[in-house]
Every structure is written in C-alpha cells, then in structure tokens.
Amino acid sequence: MAGSTVSSQQNAEYQKQMQIEQAQIRQRMARIGRKILVLSGKGGVGKSTVAVNLAISLSLAGKRTGLLDIDIHGPSVPKILNLEGKMVGGMPDAILPVELNANLKVMSIGFLLSSATDAVIWRGPRKYHMIKQFLKDVEWGELDYLIIDSPPGTGDEPLAIIQLLETADGAVVVTTPQEVALSDVRRGITFCRSLDLPVLGVLENMSGFVCPTCGQRTDIFKSGGGESMAASMDVPFLGRIPIDPQIVEACDSGQPYVDKYRQSQAAQAFSEAVIRLVGTHSESVMTTGQKGDQ
Ligand SMILES: Nc1ncnc2c1ncn2[C@@H]1O[C@H](COP(=O)(O)OP(=O)(O)OP(=O)(O)O)[C@@H](O)[C@H]1O
C-alpha cells in the first residue's frame, strides 16, 4: 500500500515535470514562424544536403532561419557548413546556436560530441530526452523558419520531434528516383499522415546527370519516379535536383552550394523547389536565388 502511494506520487511528479517542460517548449516555439521537417524514407538520398540548402536559401532571402540537426547517429550539418569543432554558447537556462550569418543560426548534436568520430549509442528514451532538451533549451530568438534535419526512416527521432513540437507545419520528403528508395518514401508519407503532419512536398534528388563534357544526359538512378509517386499519393511535388559533382565538392569543403553555384542547373532547380515550398514568400526567394554572379 505504502509502495503504491510512493509510486503514484512519483508518477504525479513525473507528469508535472513533463507538463512544465512541454510548456517551456511551447514558449520557445511560439517565437518561431514555420517549423519544417526534412525527412527521407531511406539514408543517403541527400536529406541533409536539402535541409542545409533550404535553410541557406531562406536566409539569403532575408528570412530569419534556424537549422536544427537531430540526426543523432550521423550529424552531417556541421561538416556540410564547415562548422566542425564549433563550440555552442551557453546561458544559465539556454544553449546558444552557432550563427552562420546574420539570418542563419545552426544547432546540431554534432556540436555536443567531443570529436567528429564519436559514435552515439543511445536507446529511444535517451534520444527523446536529447531532442526535448534541444527544443526546450536552444535559444533561437525570433525566427521566421526552423528547418529540422531528421535522421532517415520513421524511427524514434522523427516521432519524438513531431510529438514534442505539437505544431510543426509539415514535412519535406526527399527521395531519389529509383523504386528501392520510393517504396521507403511511401512509408514515410504514411508515417506523416498517421501523425497528422502535412506533407508539404516531395523532392526528387539525384535526378539525372548531364555530362559536363559531352552534354549527354544519363538517368543514373532513373528519373521521374518521385513525381509519379507524389501524384499517386496525392502530395505536392517540389521538383527534381540533378546530380551535380559540385554539390559533393561543396558539401565536403563546407561551402554553401546554392550560394556558391547560383547559376548552376541544380541550384536553379533548388531555388524553384523552395519557391513551391514557401509559397507566399516566393518573390524574395526568387529574387535572391536568381541574382548575383556565380
Ligand atoms: N544532387 C546531388 N548531386 C550530387 N551529390 C549529391 C546530391 N545530393 C546529395 N549529394 C551527395 O550525396 C551524399 C549524401 O548526401 P546527404 O548526407 O545529404 O544524404 P542524407 O540523406 O542526409 O544521408 P543520411 O542518411 O546519412 O542522413 C553527400 O556526399 C552529398 O554531397
């Protein structure tokens, strides 16, 4: 009897603590306009590349943007943005994100690991706790957009963030065109629907390669599969990003691709996809995406 009283007391305290933390998350998130998750059904399809370049495009368009990398097992955002080894700032009750430029703040689990080679072996509850801490403690300030790079698949991390955010605006689902990737994406879309998370669009990455020497196009992973899958699942299609070796080079050297190679076919395709995605803010994104020299 005494034991059950203690455990019900503990349970009540735990519930109270959860409510306090959820209220803290709500308070932080109330200062952020649109919260967009970038998901993929399968690993290696370019999800982090898309998340980074989406965040850069929005920041170049003058939108106050945050980029949150919750890919606990493979945080690649610090590498792609040449932020490896950066220390995040701290305040008594908050973690300060790294400021990449005046409009772009970045937070990644990678900043909290002691080296780029550290492996994280965490079970579900610990991942949930880390994601909750990010949402509760990272001091973004006022943002127009928060872009969240989630790990591939439909596991603990995307589930945790969707539940904890409560009010995410939706997901961009990245795929490559071949059937083996598309079947995983269908599962990803079903996952979003079962959690009432709107699918804002499907982006087909690595869609064809145009040889820079002879100009011949080769559909290495096929082409068009993402578009027909989006139509059959009744979700918007955002466009096709071709394979471009300069994307690999930019990612590996930590340079923002859409900024550095603005006139390239892939950057233009990227820019059009962002316009389809953000809709009402399209003019400013278009202006930024098309101005400037390479
Ligand atoms: N359109 C593209 N053309 C050429 N290379 C690309 C393209 N998109 C992404 N890449 C390259 O593919 C590799 C994987 O990309 P990325 O890390 O973004 O994938 P991911 O889906 O986030 O992977 P993970 O499953 O590990 O999270 C990187 O080397 C990146 O530079």
Image (cartoon, rainbow, N blue to C red):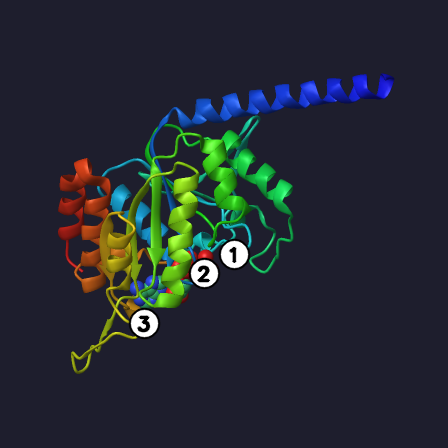
Question: What is the residue that sits farthest to the right in this orientation?
Answer: 2
Residue 87 picture location, percent across and down: 52, 44
Query: In terms of image quarters, where does ligand 1 lie?
Result: bottom left
Tell me the SS state at disc 1: loop
Amino acid marked by disc 1: Gly
Q: What is the number of the mark on residue 282?
A: none
Within 10 Å of disc 2 (Cα), the crowding (few <14, some 14-19, many 20+) is some
Give the label, 1 or 2, closer to the camera.
2
Within 10 Å of disc 3 (Cα), the crowding (few <14, some 14-19, many 20+) is some
Left or right: 16 in relation to 179:
right
Residue 171 picture location, percent across and down: 35, 44
Read off the residue under disc 3: 221
Q: Quadrant of the C terminus?
A: bottom left
Read off the residue under disc 1: 74
Which residue occupies the foreground of this view, 124 or 80?
124
Q: Quadrant of the N terminus?
A: top right
Amino acid marked by disc 2: Gly
221 shown above or below 253: below
Amino acid marked by disc 3: Phe
Contact between labelled residues 2 and 1, with CB atoms less than 8 Å apart: yes
Read off the residue under disc 2: 43
Which residue occupies the foreground of this view, 141 or 238?
238
In three-dimensional space, the C-alpha distance between marks 1 and 2, rounded to whole angstroms, equals 10 Å
